[in-house]
Amino acid sequence: MRTRPAAMGIGGLALAWAAVAVILQARDPLSANVFPGPLQVLRTAVALSADGSLGHHAWASFRRVLLGYGLAVAVGVPMAWVAGASPALARQVQPILALLRPIPPFAWIPISLLALGIGDASAVAIVFLGAFFPIVLNTFEGLYRVDPAWLLAARNLGASPAQVVLSVRLPASLPRMLEGLRLAWTLSWMVVVVAELVGSDRGLGFLIMDSRNLGQPAMAVVGMTCIGAIAAGSEVAMLRLERRVLRWQP
Amino acid sequence: MRWPAWTLGALLLVAWETVVRLGVGVHVLPTPTAVLALGWTLLLDGTLIDHAWASGVRIGLGVGAAVLLGVPMGLVLGLSRRTGPAVEAAIRLLRPIPPVAWIPISILWFRVSDLQQYFIVFVGAWTVVSLGSIEAVRRVPDAWVRAARNLGASRAQLTRHVLTWGAGADIFTAVRRAFAVGWWVIVAAEFVSAPDGIGFLILEGRNLVQPERVFLGMACLGGLSWATDLLISWARPESLAWSEA
């Protein structure tokens, strides 16, 4: 019975959207240039997918996210492991991370644009920076906040320092790390959109900005829906994977 | 001997300063002292305060509206068995669209204006607050709600005496998150279209190739976002402390 209210809510939202569009267009035929109706958006979506431009932009964004995020995982996770595994180093790294934490990920965009100019390289770098901090912060926190009783127990049972890290710290930090990886992935999509809004010649962020310049809001709605669908779909996939890996958790 | 916890940070700062002084990446990296110097100058001539104030007003109004609308909505929807899940499904459908993706179309709707900036902050904060409140209400033990109903509490009494306290702590967390999201989103909104604000300051630094301006803006953002968080924690009513354990 859970699906019925959900279907009603989504149907109601679509109906309300259509109703507002119809009323606005009855009062002023030009309002379609500001507030597109569902049918108009659907037609635009079909046209954009037929001529391949939607796929072209989506692929451009996807590639940037994949490269930047992959790089952030490859660099961030080992870095956090090195910093978090040794208590002496962790004590030094913690205040630095605490200072960097509140800086919004989008704030790194201008620096990348300064360093690399407008283009694929800077977009990838921006995604990298946006994803890097949540990955490092969460992986590090996970390692750092392992229940001290577990560590003491392991040591009491004669585990060597290496064994404590490999058999206690790493597995115990896994939930937090995976959470960070998922957060970073959704964040990467937000960051790539902003990067493409500010300076780019393709990608979904560019598409929605371009549609504003062309005065075609239906195109913007198609782009927004596409971003939302990719973000939601990949988040669900990651959550599933996470549950699978963490089956041992209560 | 134990090194104090700031040793590595200080060493990195010194290394950063020397490397840039030696001429590495001058167009991208400012020296920390240059950032401090610029910060001092802009603080004295009032620019920094003007920009911070502009962003702060946008956050305050945008998130404020989201809280005023989202919390009562969450309380009502969380209680209702029929309309609640339906409206929640609609909100969840909209949630994956990043608030920043609303920027272009909101410029079409509201032109380049302060209202457009409030709208972007509002969109980002409102989903967090409303979904957070709905979930908070659901987490209130059913026994409390039923006990109150059994004792003849009206819906208004139930909301006032049971839900606001039972769900209060979680709602407060949602509000805190909403402010953090607000600070994220406002930077992006100000990058694209704003005549002032910290996001504008940062982008201006990029356009003028003044990396120290960019870094100053980033530091300000971090500081402001941190200060907002601290302020909210202070504002948290003492009466919510019971759920801390």
Image: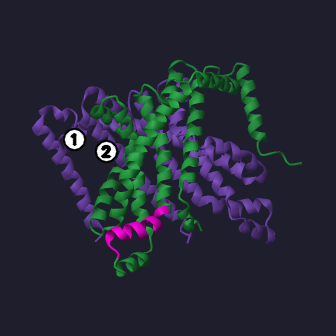
Chain colours: A purple, B green
Give the magenta range.
Answer: B153-168
Residue appearing at x 74%, y 65% in the figure: A151
On the image, the x and y values in percent for residue B79 come to: 34, 68
Q: From the image, tell me which residue sits under label 1.
A: A41
Instruction: Answer whether residue B158 is magenta in the image.
Output: yes
What is the chain identity of the residue bearing mark 2? A
User: Where A169 sits versus A194, above or below?
Assistant: below
Same chain shared by disc 2 and disc 1: yes
On the image, the x and y values in percent for residue B183 come to: 49, 41
Query: Between A249 and A30, which is closer to the camera in this rendering?
Result: A30
Q: From the image, tell me which residue sits under label 2.
A: A225
At label 1, counting other C-alpha atoms closer than 10 Å, the crowd grade (few under 14, some 14-19, many 20 or more) is some
On the image, the x and y values in percent for residue B198 come to: 51, 31
Look at label 1 and name its amino acid. Val
User: Where B104 sits versus B125, above or below?
Assistant: above
Query: Between B119 and B231, which is closer to the camera in this rendering?
Result: B231
Judged left or right of residue A39, residue B178 is right
What is the chain identity of the residue bearing mark 1? A
Instruction: Answer whether residue B227 is magenta in the image.
Output: no
On the image, the x and y values in percent for residue B234 come to: 57, 52
Look at label 2 and name its amino acid. Thr
State which tag comes first along the sequence, 2 or 1. Answer: 1
Place residue A164 in its image quadrant. Answer: bottom right
Element carrying mark 2: helix
Residue appearing at x 41%, y 41% in the figure: B61
Residue appearing at x 37%, y 71% in the figure: B158
Judged left or right of residue A87, residue B149 is left
Question: Which mark is on residue B8?
Answer: none
Place residue B142 in its image quadrant. Answer: bottom left
Query: Between A220 and A123, which is closer to the camera in this rendering?
Result: A220
Contact? badges 2 and 1 (CB < 8 Å): yes
